[in-house]
Amino acid sequence: HHVNYGSGSGLQDRVAFVQNDPGQHDASIRLADLQVSDTGTYQCRVKKNTVAVHEVIVTVQEKPAVPQCWTEGDQVQGGSVLLRCYSR
């Protein structure tokens, strides 16, 4: 019935249970506004009669930079054109 955010994680305003009452057999969580720093191992620990633990590794990759694109060659019917794009 609670989420342990860890120290200094910045997740307090971005993590919530999918269902209002996780005691109704669904303890799924939603991570909002993902950031590269959210990459890590997340653990779900459910305690009823016994304790069940499951770990999930989440990898958040950085959004690519806006590519720079250009063409090379004459843009004529029947000709060849090379399309190039580059992103840092």
Image: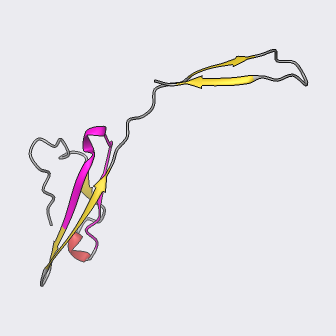
Which quarter of the rendering shows the N terminus? bottom left
- For the point 11% across and 50% down, which residue is it? 6
Q: Quadrant of residue 44?
A: bottom left
- For the point 87% across and 18% down, which residue is it? 76
Vertically, is 37 above or below 49?
Answer: above
> Measured from the top left, where is residue 55 in percent x and y?
24, 63
Q: Residue furthest right?
A: 78
> Measured from the top left, where is residue 72 in percent x and y?
72, 16
Q: Quadrant of residue 64?
A: top left
Quick one: 7 or 24, which is closer to the camera? 7
Q: Residue furthest bottom?
A: 49
Quick one: 26 or 42, which is closer to the camera? 42
23 lies left or right of 67: left
Quick one: 18 or 46, which is closer to the camera? 46
- For the point 23% across and 70% down, which residue is it? 22
- For the point 27% across and 46% down, which residue is it? 39
The mark tally for this picture is 0
Q: Which residues are magenta?
A: 26-44
Reply yes or no: does residue 70 show up in magenta.
no
> Measured from the top left, where is residue 73 in percent x and y?
77, 16
Q: Quadrant of residue 43?
A: bottom left
Which quarter of the rendering shows the C terminus? top left
Reply yes or no: does residue 41 show up in magenta.
yes
> Measured from the top left, where is residue 38 in percent x and y?
26, 44
Image coloring type: secondary structure
